[in-house]
Amino acid sequence: MRDPLSSKIKDVKPSGIRKFFDIVTEMKDAISLGVGEPDFDTPWRIRQEGIKSIEKGRTFYTSNAGLKELKIEICKYLKDRYDLDYDYQTETLITVGGSEAIDIAFRAMLDEGDEVIIPQPSYVSYVPCCELADGTPVIINLKNENEFKLTAEELEEAITDKTKLLLLSFPNNPTGAIMTKEELAPLVDVIIKHDIYVISDEIYSELSYKGKHCSIASFPGMKERTLVINGFSKGFAMTGWRLGYVCGPKIIIEQMFKIHQYAIMCAPTNSQYAATVGMRKCIGEVEQMRESYDERRRFLMKEFKRIGLSCFEPFGAFYVFPCIKEFGMSSEDFATRLLQEEKVAVVPGTAFGECGEGFLRISYAYSINDLRVAIGRLENFINKLRAQA
């Protein structure tokens, strides 16, 4: 029989995150710090609206682009937060999570051979989605000494005459790094100079612990060349509701809408009704969750210092990215042995790019009690390694 598979899909590697998650689900008494899954329940008023929408028979398709009420609330939110003006009818699209928005943005914007600059470490889907859309990923390996922030010099060096897109993701998964307004400003000059577009994945925008998040789209000259992608999974603890959105120039949103229309039809109806209530009434609960994450972040940084584990201080998302180079092991070997010997699951930094070698992603989207137990086990493991050295 002929090979039923495309060569393109066979070259795509499976997610490095899922590997350890799948193992830990079968391991008794294991603690997983590997998955970016908030441990909070979705705020009750959001759940209540989801229930009510089903009870009222709101199980029909919505408009392909999403509920009018939700799009209006999103546009109000972006105006209030970042002084960004978007038209809810022509510049806003509701998607199945931020992940769909990333996928269809690449497919709408890229021709074969177009280059996409992707700073790494970064979320695992960026490179595969780019390749599946016939784009060419150009990787910038971010540096620990710069706290994994992108510099204008690094960006300038990566640009060629084939560069079309820059993908930014701050606050960052996996490092927890943020970029302030002052740090983004030099990038803007380079972007406009070379006439490139930006996909800004801001899914962790509500989880910033050092001042208010800044969107690169808010700079003069950037709104017309930027897609802002966000959603409800992280800040609103709505991962399973599968709801995101993208705002950007009408000319791009129109084409993304066509792909969404044919491939998806519309995002889940009850999720859209629920998220509308979340935007209107649950920002307070989001702020409470953020405060709790910040407490956990500070706890881990204090514990890392106590046990002598090197880690720059992250100010966003709910991840830390400690360095384990002192132990002379690959990230994969360290994470594998930690799981086998101490029953603690973390993700090797290499799951997020080659420059993640020598680092681990540890999520603090878990209770302080779980984090305390996990740190105790991590400390035991590190002490054994140091004793053997």
Image (cartoon, grey):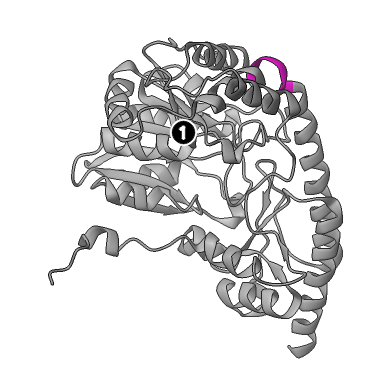
Quick one: SS at disc 1?
strand
Residue positioned most to the bottom: 388
Q: Is residue 307 above or below residue 182?
A: below
Of residues 184 and 254, the one nearer the viewer is: 254
**Residue 272, x across and y down, in percent:** 54, 23
Q: Is residue 97 above or below residue 81?
A: below
Residue at the image point whose x is 43% and y is 9% from the top: 87
Of residues 319 and 340, the one nearer the viewer is: 340
Amino acid found under the numbered disc labelled 1? Ser
Residue bounds of the magenta highlight: 279-283
Residue bearing mark 1? 200
* The N terminus sits in image quarter: bottom left
In this rendering, would 365 be left or right of 257? right
**Residue 245, x across and y down, in percent:** 47, 27
In this rendering, would 86 be left or right of 364? left
| Disc 1 packing (10 Å; few <14; some 14–19; many ≥20) | many
Residue 282 drawn in magenta = yes
**Residue 152, x across and y down, in percent:** 45, 40
Residue at the image point whose x is 27% and y is 33% from the top: 108
Residue 275 seen by the camera: no
Of residues 359 and 76, the one nearer the viewer is: 76
In this rendering, would 182 be left or right of 252? right
Q: Quadrant of residue 162?
A: top left
Residue at the image point whose x is 54% and y is 55% from the top: 143
Q: Is residue 324 above or below residue 155?
A: below
- The majority secondary structure of the magenta stretch comes to helix
Q: How many marks?
A: 1
Residue positioned most to the left: 2
